[in-house]
Amino acid sequence: MLDVRVLGFVGLGVMGGPMCANLTTKSGLPVVVHDVAEEAVAAAVEAGAQRAAGLADLAARADVIFLSLPAIDQVEDVAGEILAAPRRPAVIVDMSTSDVARTRALGERAAAAGVTLADAPVARLRQAARDGTLLITVGATMEVFSLLGPYLSCMGSDIVHAGGLGNGQVIKILNNMIVFQNVNALAEALAIGRTAGVDGRLLFETLQLGSADSFQLRNSAMATLVPDEFPLKTFPTVYAIKDLALALKLAADAGLTVKGAEQTMELLAATRDAGYAENYYPAMIKLIDGRG
């Protein structure tokens, strides 16, 4: 088993920042960080992390490096710089939501450079990232999964071995596909209910008592759809489109037709085009009820 002495973390954004903070305070190991945003690095250093001079320096110091980046494009770029460094980590862990085929191809590139790639995307909301209660689905060998377990447990309360490389992404992508369709259904129900004269909060509180109850109903719907507030920098519409496109690609590769997901994608695209690209994606209700 690898003797892990130093951890690395790249990508200190809305999710990555609190994830790294938990890793820093709970792992018992030094954590070296890098991000293109200086304020994000400064916050991580204040929480106890060490600053890397760049990706090559990070690769020279860390044995396991965690990535939390917007998409596979950034993952490939960052991983490419790490793999080109004179000294490389033993393991790179992609905690982003990334394309499955490109993740597996990147794993082959990493292996050729003597580095193991694992995918460990996260689910649940930003508060779960702060609380260290994320769901993390891991694509890796059992040996690598066992190695990573103590560190992933600093960031998540449910750590699932999904199988081989890429399988963690498959589960995360399908989780998000269901979430977006669920919010679509809730937004439609709210629009219909309000038009028919029912108070929106009463509608959703009552639905929680029956078989229509769901995590999204109790959380995103109550927090955003009911007050009609869709803040910036929460989980914007363009991010939802990116993730749902990954699910549709998996379906297309399998020769499957998924009409529900396709309809939700059309609605998200219309929401983006109506000017809500950076708003929290439940803003889709504005298109449903005719305000878009």
Image (tube, rainbow, N blue to C red):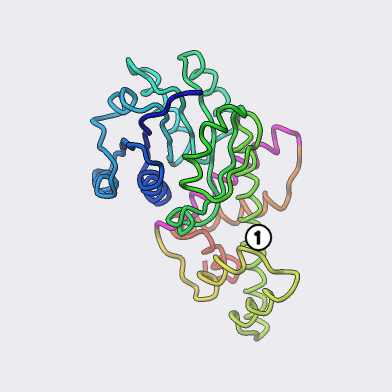
Magenta part of the chain: 233-255
Q: Does 68 sit above or below residue 107?
A: below
Looking at the picture, how far across and down is residue 212, in whole percent?
A: 72, 69
Q: Is residue 34 left or right of residue 151?
A: left
Is residue 12 shown in magenta? no
Tell me the element at label 1.
helix
* Quarter of the image where one finds residue 183: bottom right
Q: Is residue 51 left or right of residue 171?
A: left
Label 1 packing within 10 angstroms: few (<14), some (14-19), many (20+): some
Residue that mark 1 sits on: 182
Which residue occupies the extreme bottom position in the image? 197
| Rendered residue at 41%/42% (across/down) | 27
Q: Three-letter amino acid code at disc 1?
A: Asn
Looking at the picture, how far across and down is residue 123, in whole percent?
A: 55, 50
| Rendered residue at 29%/46% (across/down) | 44
Of the pair 258 and 23, the residue shown nearer to us: 23
Marks counted in the figure total 1
Q: Does 23 sit above or below residue 223?
A: above
Of the pair 46 and 191, the residue shown nearer to us: 46
Is residue 243 shown in magenta? yes
Q: Does 2 sit above or below residue 218?
A: above
| Rendered residue at 65%/46% (across/down) | 174
Q: In this view, does 107 lie to the left or right of 79?
A: right
Of the pair 127 and 27, the residue shown nearer to us: 27
